[in-house]
Image (tube, grey):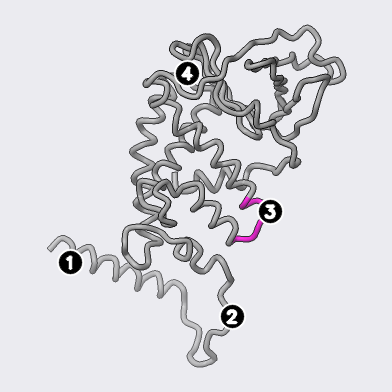
Amino acid sequence: MRGLLLAFLLAATPVAAQGVPEALRGTWAAGSCAAPGALLHVTARGIARLPADGPSRLVRFRAMRDQDGWLLGTGEGPEAPRILLRADGEALDLAEPDVKLRDDRLPGATPVTRWSRCPSGPVALALLHGEGFAFLGALERLEQACQAGPMPACVSGLVGVADVSGDGLLSVSELARLLRGAAWALAVQQGSEPDGIAAAGGVGSIAALAAARLIVGSLDYDDDGRLSPAEIGQDRLVFAPGTGSAEGRPGTLEALAEGAGLLRGLIERMAEE
């Protein structure tokens, strides 16, 4: 869990600046919002489709372009899935062409599904997917800040997307929320059904809390229970100057490891007493 967010950031390849138009972004439902047959969440660079009964699908676009009145998004991976999106009044049209259909013939006879906008939904679906939807948007903003920008911009981006309280610091619960969203995204990417997403969320919640406590504990230098941008960026915003000291002689790293082991054993013994 600790390396989950970093893996997302480093694995993704930045796409062109064009994104899904804001009018198409958000959460949509097949059927009524009160009892949807499926939910579709559209971000600036991808979609998540979540049937009420069936496997989920997450497609993150590595390329986008206009195609005869549609927005054509091409996903990552060897299959390079294609998604067609189009506004139709207050509704959203979606088409998923067959892999054998050539780009210059899209959309062709591809079936089109219609979706209605849903700013909120049933309690059960909100609990299951709400944090995941928020994470997808946060992830895209983090990718923008971290893939091409300097380290200070990446740290500021992390604080910006995770700081729910608005105090400029990250608590254990705020980091755990981000990690729970990442666990949800992995489950959806793997094509999990609702029960599988719920199970992943249950296990992920426990792991996310443990990982968040570990992260805060390892970086919280002033021991106030929260992380500041300076603490997150310690030794990372600017590389340490190579001054050192000309005095003394090089020791062995193995000796340092032995000393660390002795110190850890002493601390554990004191804690037991």
Looking at the image, is mark 4 or mark 3 nearer the viewer? 3
Residue nearer the viewer, 214 or 169: 169
Q: Amino acid at mark 2?
A: Gly
Which numbered disc, 4 or 3, marks the residue that appears first in the sequence?
3
Mark 3: secondary structure: loop
**Residue depicted at 42% across the width and 46% down the height:** 164
Looking at the image, is mark 2 or mark 1 nearer the viewer? 2
Mark 2: secondary structure: loop
**Residue depicted at 75% across the width and 17% down the height:** 99
Reading the image, the residue beneath label 3 is: 148
| Stretch in magenta | 145-151
For marks 2 and 1, give the CA distance: 37 Å
> Pointer 2 and pointer 1: residues touching (CB < 8 Å)?
no
Q: Amino acid at mark 1?
A: Met
Residue nearer the viewer, 121 or 130: 121
Name the quadrant of the C terminus: bottom left
Task: Judge whether residue 76 can be spotted in this image.
Answer: no
Residue 216's place in the image compared with 248, above or below, is above
Residue 169 appears left or right of 83: left
Q: Which mark is residue 224?
A: none
Reading the image, the residue beneath label 4 is: 193
Residue nearer the viewer, 162 or 178: 162
Residue 190 pos. (x, y %): 54, 26
Task: Judge whether residue 85 can be spotted in this image.
Answer: yes
For marks 4 and 2, give the CA distance: 52 Å
Residue 36's place in the image compared with 221, above or below, is above
- Residue projecting furthest to the bottom: 247
Residue 3's place in the image compared with 34, above or below, is below
Reading the image, the residue beneath label 1 is: 270
Reading the image, the residue beneath label 2 is: 242
Which numbered disc, 2 or 3, marks the residue that appears first in the sequence?
3
